[in-house]
Amino acid sequence: MLNFEYYNPTRIVFGKDQLGRLPELLKENKAQRILLTYGQGSIKKTGLYQSIMDVLSDFHVVPFQGIEANPEYTTLLKARDLGREEKIDFILAVGGGSVIDGTKFIAGAMKYDGDPWDVLDKKEGCNFTEAVSFGTVLTLPATGSEANSGAVINRSEFEQKRVMGGPMFFPQFSFCDPTQVATLPKRQLANGITDAYMHTLEQYITYPSGNLLQERQAEAILATLVEIGPKVVENPSDYTLAANLMWCATHALNGVLRCGVPTDWVTHMIGHELTAFYGIDHARTLAIIAPRLYEAMFSGKKEKLAQYGKRIWNLTGSEEEIAKKAIESTERFFQSLGIDTRISDYTENHEGVEARVREVFETRGWTAMGEREAIDPSKVEEIVAAAI
Amino acid sequence: MLNFEYYNPTRIVFGKDQLGRLPELLKENKAQRILLTYGQGSIKKTGLYQSIMDVLSDFHVVPFQGIEANPEYTTLLKARDLGREEKIDFILAVGGGSVIDGTKFIAGAMKYDGDPWDVLDKKEGCNFTEAVSFGTVLTLPATGSEANSGAVINRSEFEQKRVMGGPMFFPQFSFCDPTQVATLPKRQLANGITDAYMHTLEQYITYPSGNLLQERQAEAILATLVEIGPKVVENPSDYTLAANLMWCATHALNGVLRCGVPTDWVTHMIGHELTAFYGIDHARTLAIIAPRLYEAMFSGKKEKLAQYGKRIWNLTGSEEEIAKKAIESTERFFQSLGIDTRISDYTENHEGVEARVREVFETRGWTAMGEREAIDPSKVEEIVAAAI
């Protein structure tokens, strides 16, 4: 087990009919002037927006509508400017991972004097060192952003995604209400399940490293998602199913699974490029890349793939056979949720995509990735080519 | 799934050779005058005391030696007085669950003007409302106290144990170094494994309630402890085994397992009385009571017992048979660690113990306990009688 630090101070308020706690938690955080960030307006249709405004009648609330899926840098700068103008002292993000990720950026950018792109671009000496406090009301279980301190920001004009984070980007609190799941379209539900599943696999399908509890904690999430995944897509208003999905998605990326373990986030790194190029939903890019990455890196991952195949899919045979069948089972699981697993299922315009992705990795100097540092840009090219 | 709140702000610093981080974390917590609380002095023999003093050369450190297993109220009052005299602004607990529990009490009592026994005795209007900040250096994986906000305090003169807690009793940080496990006697190791196992069972052996992830999170801990338990007692200097034990014990009681689930802490409640009467090690009282409690409450717990039997012990047969065999397997597991599971193994002086425990429960008005509120004092008497 590698040395590690674990710290996660976010308060999770989980369950139905909990919004009455919101004013109290805002007061504990000395919030008075609140920027309410949200997406394209679905929360107005579902009634959530009004429910929140009703309980916030004692606060000065400034709404900011329009954070996109894959939160867009230029949109977030507008929110930053509004936040500064309105002397905002707390941000309440109401939405899924994109709204919450975008809010983390806004919270940092409001307190940053320079050009915040320098921070995202990791320019030397450029860091967010403080942030406006914020909380979240989660509408879509998927990314785990409600319980971690990371974010992914998109800048379409450059066709680029950038990651950011740091200890000041933990939400002060997150309301997780499983009844929100019933308001979601099937596509978003399937994406959420896939995203949570892949967050777990990327902290698990590496090599055996004696992290017996962490492996079983990962398997707990995987087994639960396999059990409930297709059912919750069919019956999103089943509270028990929805609650389990929501709690799985939070746990998949709240920092527990990575404690002391090697990880391999290359599926995410490649997936981000596919979203940047083609606008393919984030979760779907992961379902496209993961099976091909596991095939390409098979010799280094086969022991964990076999453990996964036995414990999650009850597969039998030789270690090698089980490991191979585990990849097939994973791909079929995504397909059972209605997720296509090939780039060509999403775009006809894929010629040369493998070289484009390789070039991005080369430009960024990403030459030794994955848990064994064995993935270089030419390996990335091979993986993407196999995923077309 | 029941509604719940989860909040745990303790920073865990896990691994070997991490004490160099201590000064930085103390400075972040504005610590200048530190009360260093510890037990009977084993940390001087192992060298840990000196290692800590070496890294704390920039701080004013006041040592307080002598917190007992089952931390004793009168001892803790002496520490409180010393802390006040020395104008202590931070407490560093170095030890196992007893030292850490005792430190939580000291931290609250230092800031409390009245008689702190009133707080432990739950006298109306008597509460700890603030506490001196504290951190921990864990030496014994067992209770999870390093990552939660609860404590159990002993007052021998009354033959009583009292629980306390609250959000200000989370450690600011906890250093968890698995190499400490190698310094422990077999008896303490066996106790630690048993304590962590029972913390998990008490949040798991209830009734099915649709908490699919939480059940599997509990099973992850149980399966890991079954896998490593006897091995780590034999080979406590095996770092991987020790690290898994330490991380299991933390997770067994850091608040995650109880999220949204029914719990049954009656084994602990009865066990505390056996410790108060006879001085039997806390963990051993749990191993004595749990099998008999599961037999006495069999009809209400058999579904979860059967799930546990299948998933942890790979048992086969009818549901009823599996559930019964699961109890036997649990008792044998404790015995395999060297833990005796009968009161008469520890004392000859057990006549009338069942009536004494019943009377305590009656006096306290504990009449409807367990996940179904089906355990009353006469049921407690039956369980204790069966455990002799």
Image (spheres, coloured by chain):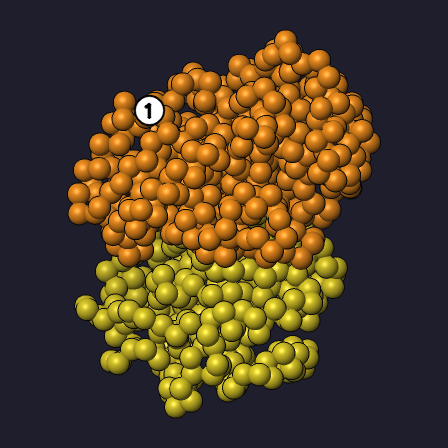
Chain colours: A yellow, B orange
* In this view, A54 is above or below B23: below
* Residue lying farthest to the front in this orientation: B114
Residue linked to disc 1: B42
Q: Position of residue A44 (x, y in %)?
A: 64, 83
- Total labels: the figure holds 1
The C terminus of chain B lies in quadrant: top right
Instruction: Pick whichever, A213 or B338, lies toward us.
Output: B338
The type of residue carrying mark 1 is Ser
Residue closest to the far bottom? A85
Instruction: Give whichever of A151, B76 is nearer the camera.
Output: B76
Viewed as shown, does residue A322 lie left or right of B296? Answer: left
Q: Is residue B271 visible to us here?
A: no
Residue at 46% across / 43% down in the picture? B105
Q: Quadrant of residue A351?
A: bottom left
Residue at 46 percent across and 27 percent down: it is B69
Residue A146 visible? The answer is: yes
Chain ID of residue with mark 1? B
Q: Is residue A250 above or below residue B297?
A: below
Whole-percent x, y for residue B182 in the image:
35, 23
- Taking the image as shown, residue B44 lies to the left or right of residue B188, namely left
**Residue drawn 28% across the image and 57% down it:** B30
